[in-house]
Amino acid sequence: MTAPARRRRPNLAVLGLTPFALYVLLFLAVPTVLAVTTGFFDKKGGFTLDNVSALFTPQVLSTFLSSFWVSGVTAVVGAVVGALVCYALLGTRPEGALRQSINSASSVLAQFGGVMLAFAFIATIGVQGIITVTLKNLGVDLYADGVWLYQVPGLLLPYLYFQVPLMVITFLPALEGLKPQWAEANATLGGSRLTFWVRVAGPILAPSFFGSLLLLFANAFSSYATAAALISQGSQIVPLQIRSALISETVLGRSNLAGALALGMIVVMVVVMFGYSLLQSKTARWQR
Amino acid sequence: MSSPRLGATPSRTARTIILSLVGLLFAVPILAMIEFTFRDGLSGSYTLTHWTNLANPAVNAKYAPLATALANSGVLVVVTVLLVLVVLLPTMILVELRFPRLRRVLEFICIVPITVPAIVLVVGLVPVYSVVVKVAGSSIWSLGFAYGITVLPYAYRAIQANLGTVDVVTLSEAARSLGAGWATVLLRVILPNLRRGILAAAFISIAVVLGEFTIASLLNRVNLQTALVLISKSDPYVAVIFSLLALAFAFVLLLLIGRLSTVGSRRRKA
């Protein structure tokens, strides 16, 4: 009698997995599949490559280029500044109040993207922002060449505001993983601090640094809310172009363009995140 | 700092310069928001009225949409946290206990929403929600299903960080051999051990849902963030005040998460 009872139990336990499976199927798998496949259909449901070929029109390509540019610049600057902060934090005690509070502040600010971030920057460097007005009184006009805050270059500073903290929380564990013994070994063998950074710490940290850089790129590339709150009209970067496509449905006279744009974004995200996980697995070796 | 510096440690000057410079730059936008809420229009002088107006019934009638939005966000927080507790948490425990081989699969599924950004997901959610609205009506709570997916990576990591340190298999076998039923095992043995992870997952979910804009805005639903955008066009001061309050609230929540994890790690080391 025990054998059938044993066999029945796993079956019942499998039932326990169904709510989650069903939920993920309906609200993650179905929307994702719909998002990337609608681009292949026209309004009447017939198969078409029109939308996907629209990805290669100059108008859409230039939007992707702007997105790459914003994500690339903020990822590189964010990674370098964030890494410097991590480096400075190495000089503080790990359990000390300073490192703990910078750590928590970073995890808050890394989440801070969106509408509220846009407000913060409008209050800072908007036309009436405190920095703009102060500089004007000093004779410097931030907006001598027109108001750039509500255009693509205006995204750089707000994006850096969440990119640097994200770098701090992703890169700090790698720097903390540098063992004091390695520095001691380097010193006993007659190496200088420069040797240590170039020959020991550099190669060990490189995969983690570039992995974090890719994560920052993906983070900026996929973020929508900050840009949407700053730039209320137009399709300057890919997420904003998806917005216009969803709202008007007739961008470039094509329906379902949003689906094709979503497909393009997913392809970029999958490539970037694949690179990230490759580099991450190289990092994990040293974090024991 | 008198010992010779070896390898990685930065000099004291370098450390001070970097941290104070970056700290200062990051404080400016927050301070600018605070300064903004005290401005008296474009006159250049300062006033408290934007803050006192919050308690002034004569004026705050026009903040009614914001109150609705706050209530909506409250409902969404409850639905999302319930999804995490009722759908994700039991699945994670079940996988840990009975299907350890599915652990990688579950992890992969939970990390997917990082690769599928909200702006992509929303393209597919538009048709899904046109069905959901037919079945469940257009009230706000159904949006929680989409948010449950958005918080999946965060909630999963928070719970998994805790689950990894607790040997639930041994614990449940011990409880079972002492005669406990499965309900007792779950409620009195496993869940109390996961309290930290569960709390952290709930807090991070609350913070994410309160800050969510993309999905609500493109599905034409009203939540705190979409209402903030709307009201900022007529009364930017109130929008900034509420942003500051929401930010302070999120800060407290995430500080609590940090507290939870450091208390835990200290206890583990002891």
Image (spheres, rainbow, N blue to C red):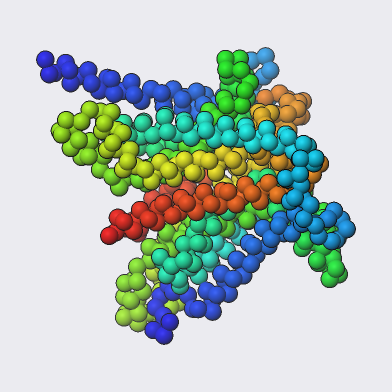
> What residue lies at 57% left-to-right and 58% top-to-bottom?
A164
Which residue is at the far bottom?
B2
The one nearer the camera, A125 or A79, is: A125
Quadrant assignment, res B156: top left
Note whether B264 is above or below A133 in the view shown. above
Please provide percent x and percent y for residue A110: 56, 52
In the rendered structure, the answer to whether residue B158 lies left or right of residue A149 reads left
Where, by quadrant of the figure, is residue B74 drawn?
top right
Which quadrant would the N terminus of chain B be assigned to in this image?
bottom left
Camera-side residue of A277 and A46 = A277
Residue B188 position, x and y percent, is 28, 36
Residue plotted at (42% across, 29% down): B87
Q: Is residue B117 visible?
A: no
Q: Residue at x 28, y 45 (%)?
A: B166
Q: Quadrant of residue B32?
A: bottom right
Using residue A4 as the reference point, say whether residue B99 is left or right of it. right
Q: Position of residue A59 (x, y in %)?
A: 74, 38
Most foreground residue, B155 or A150:
B155
Q: Check the picture and name the quadrant holding the C terminus of chain B.
A: bottom left
Q: Residue at x 42, y 59 (%)?
A: A173
Q: Is residue B261 visible?
A: yes
Residue found at the very far right of the displayed protein: B43
Residue B181 pos. (x, y %): 22, 27
